[in-house]
Amino acid sequence: MSALAASAARLGDAIGRPVRCGEPGPGWTRCADVDAEFVTRWEQAVSAQHIREFGRSHPAASAAYVLGWYAGVPAELGGALYRLARRVPRLDRDAVAFRRAGEAYPDAYALLDARFWCLPTDPAADHPDATPVADEPALAAVLRAQVRAHADAFVAEHPSRRLLPRRALLGAFTDGLDTGLWLAGDTTPERLLPDAALALPAGPSPLPASTLHVLVDGRGRRHVDRRTLSCCYYFKIDLAAGPCGTCPRIPAADRLRRLTDLPDGPAGS
C-alpha cells in the first residue's frame, strides 16, 4: 500500500464518495482526457436530464453544472486531504480521475499518482513518494498552485466558458476547495475558518479567497456561512425555485433572514 492510500480511504469517508489510489479501471475518466468534445457531450447529457425533470433547459445551467462538478474533482480532493492529513496530492490533469453516476455528477475520485507534499512532521515524510515542505503556509501555497494549474488547463478547454462570468470560472475551483475543507474536519468556526484562511487567503493569490465566514443571525446564533463565487443557474430551469442558499445573488439581508428563520438545533447553531 502506498503512503497515500490510507489517507485516501479516510478521505473517502470524509467527503462521502470513494477515493482510490492508482489506476481505477474501466468506467473512469482521466481528467487529462476531458477535452472540449467531452465537455460538450457532458453538457448535452445534463441538458437532456433537465428537460426530463423540469421540461426545460438552459445553456448557462448546463455549463455551470459541468463546471462545478468538474472543478470539485481536483479542488475537493486537494482541500479535503489538506485539512484531513496536511497532505497535498498531485492534482494536475494527468494525476486525477473520476467516475460519473450515469452521465451526471462524479460519484468517485481517483488519485493516479502516489506522490504528495507534506510537513516535515508527517509520519511518512521520509517515504520516497513524499516531498516535505517547510511549514503549513508553504504546504497551503502548494495546494493553491496545484489547483490553479489544473483550473487553467481545464478552462482553456471549456467550450462554454463564454456563457459564464469570468469570475465564476476560477471561482468554481475556490468553491470546490471550500467544500473539501468544510467536509473533511471540525466545522466549528474556531477550527474551520483558520484552515480556510490559510488554504485560501485574502490578498494576492493564485485563487480567489475562501468565502467561508461566520454570520450572526437575528437571534444571536453564530453560523458558518459561505457565498459561492460560481452559480449553478438552477433557477433558470426550475422556474418555481429561487437562488440556492449559498448563491452569490442572494442579498446580505435575505441571507441573514434565511439563517434567522432556521429552527434551533445543529443546523442553526
Image: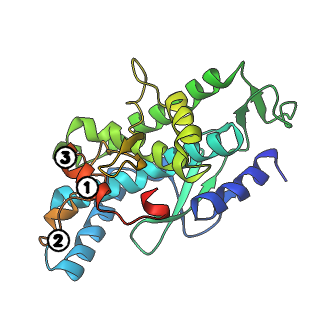
Note whether 219 is above or below 151 in the view shown. below
In the structure shown, which secondary structural element does the residue marked by tag 2 occupy?
loop
Distance between the Cα atoms at labels 1 and 3?
29 Å
Distance between the Cα atoms at labels 3 and 2?
24 Å
Residue that label 2 marks = 238
In the structure shown, which secondary structural element does the residue marked by tag 3 occupy?
helix
Q: Are marks 1 and 3 in contact (CB under 8 Å)?
A: no
User: Which amino acid, mark 1?
Assistant: Ala
Query: Could you tell which of marks 1 and 3 lies nearer the N-terminus?
Result: 1
Question: In this orientation, which residue lies closer to the viewer: 105 or 200?
Answer: 200
Residue that label 1 marks = 63
Residue that label 3 marks = 253
Query: Could you tell which of marks 1 and 2 lies nearer the N-terminus?
Result: 1
For disc 2, the neighbor class at 10 Å (few under 14, some 14 to 19, many from 20) is some
257 left or right of 224? left
Let me know if residue 132 appears in the view. yes
